[in-house]
């Protein structure tokens, strides 16, 4: 007996209805968030701006970007203006660039300016290079100048690269702690050439960059990205007493594919090097080193190395690391239990202080949801 056509088409109709319902729900969410963006409460407007960046797609930009630009340009709260600029950075719609650039000469809040510059770096084009370069050379607030340099690196191109090199080699304003010149080095990771490294090293040595951790860490990033033979410099920097520099150098070694070098670092006699290498393994996802991480987490004689390896395994979502991180909540070292709480919060999105039982339940819920 032949079935009526309706019954044959019913599954297809059900799918189409489900898709239509899903699209309607997404449209309703955009409308709801846009209403929150107009809330009289600044905190709700800040939250709404962040949510709009999360749900934005190119098809939704015409609905989402103009209200964000309105808040960026006119909201009385600097927190809201900053949140709108951060959202616009995440969206990176080129149509926002003219408003972002025009606002740079009007905005007075340094936090808002910093966010706007970073947004312009992502949304802008070559015609915005001059605007960014002027801010990088002349603004009186170092964080704003650093953001302009970073934006030039993100924008890319030869004109932007030339201005970044100028900021490194001939800074127009004092830069005693190398914050601006280090920002230029990091910008060259994006827009520089391999042959820029010689100019960077000259500026680094003549300008005393080795005295500042940010400059050393920035150099490690650039060497890993641009040097055709990065190991000689990275091997020196991984011995740095500042863990921020050592981890950056170890991460550079890991990401350039030198597995044997990473394994040697995990066996290094200096605990700071082993800890840095453990963190780098997790960030770079060097699977060939996971076994060594497990050994360090269980048996290394140095507490900091054991903890770095435990956090690395947790970042790699190894189940055995759950117990390591939960035990960190009971540590007498504030750095350890604070890092444990931060790692658990990032994983689950929940907040339970140092309550081990509550966090264990949160981890179970998280794993069931995966």
Image (tube, rainbow, N blue to C red):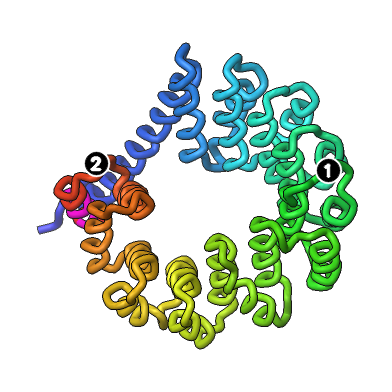
Task: Kindly report which numbered mark, 1 or 2, lies closer to the viewer in this rendering.
Answer: 1
Rendered image quadrant of residue 144: top right
**Mark 1 sits on what residue?**
174
Image check: 184 left or right of 281?
A: right
Q: Position of residue 7 (x, y in %)?
A: 18, 49
Residue sticking out furthest to the bottom: 260
Q: Residue drawn at (32%, 44%), measured in percent from left and top? A: 349
Q: Nearer the viewer, residue 352 or 8?
A: 352
Q: Is residue 29 shown to the viewer in this render?
A: yes
Label 1 crowd bin: few (<14), some (14–19), many (20+), radius 10 Å: few
Q: Main secondary structure of the magenta part?
A: helix
Q: Position of residue 115 (x, y in %)?
A: 64, 36
Q: Which residues are magenta?
A: 361-367
Image check: 190 left or right of 128?
A: left
Residue sticking out furthest to the top: 40
Image check: 276 left or right of 328?
A: right
Q: Position of residue 118 (x, y in %)?
A: 67, 41
**Mark 2 sits on what residue?**
352
Q: Name the image quarter holding the N terminus.
A: bottom left
Secondary structure type for disc 2: loop
Q: Position of residue 181 (x, y in %)?
A: 77, 53
Q: Residue drawn at (68%, 82%), measured in percent from left and top? A: 232
Secondary structure type for disc 1: loop
Question: Does 102 lie within the magenta span?
Answer: no
């Amino acid at each position: 007996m032949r079935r009526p056509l309706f019954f044959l088409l019913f599954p297809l109709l059900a799918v189409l209805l489900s898709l239509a319902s899903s699209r309607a729900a997404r449209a309703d969410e955009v409308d709801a968030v846009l209403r929150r963006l107009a809330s009289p409460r600044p905190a709700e407007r800040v939250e709404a701006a962040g949510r709009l960046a999360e749900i934005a797609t190119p098809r939704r930009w015409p609905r989402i970007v103009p209200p964000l630009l309105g808040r960026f340009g006119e909201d009385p709260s600097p927190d809201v203006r900053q949140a709108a600029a951060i959202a616009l950075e995440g969206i990176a719609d080129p149509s926002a660039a003219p408003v972002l650039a025009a606002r740079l000469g009007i905005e007075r809040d340094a936090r808002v300016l910093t966010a706007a510059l970073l947004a312009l770096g992502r949304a802008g084009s070559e015609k915005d290079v001059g605007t960014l370069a002027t801010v990088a050379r002349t603004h009186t607030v170092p964080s704003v100048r650093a953001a302009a340099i970073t934006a030039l690196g993100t924008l890319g191109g030869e004109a932007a690269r030339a201005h970044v090199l100028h900021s490194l080699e001939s800074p127009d304003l004092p830069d005693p702690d190398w914050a601006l010149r280090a920002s230029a080095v990091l910008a060259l990771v994006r827009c520089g050439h391999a042959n820029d490294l010689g100019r960077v090293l000259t500026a680094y040595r003549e300008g005393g960059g080795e005295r500042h951790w940010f400059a050393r860490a920035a150099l490690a990033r650039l060497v890993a990205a641009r040097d055709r033979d990065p190991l000689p410099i990275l091997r020196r920097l991984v011995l740095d007493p500042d863990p921020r520099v050592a981890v950056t150098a170890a991460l550079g070694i890991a990401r350039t594919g030198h597995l044997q070098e990473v394994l040697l670092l995990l066996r290094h006699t200096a605990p700071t090097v082993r800890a840095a290498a453990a963190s780098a393994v997790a960030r770079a996802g060097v699977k060939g080193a996971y076994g060594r991480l497990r050994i360090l987490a269980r048996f290394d004689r140095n507490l900091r190395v054991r903890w770095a390896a435990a956090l690395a395994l947790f970042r790699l979502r190894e189940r055995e690391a759950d117990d390591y991180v939960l035990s960190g909540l009971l540590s007498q070292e504030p750095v350890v239990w604070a890092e444990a709480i931060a790692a658990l919060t990032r994983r689950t999105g929940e907040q339970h202080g140092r309550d081990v039982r509550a966090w264990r339940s949160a981890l179970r819920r998280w794993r069931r949801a995966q």
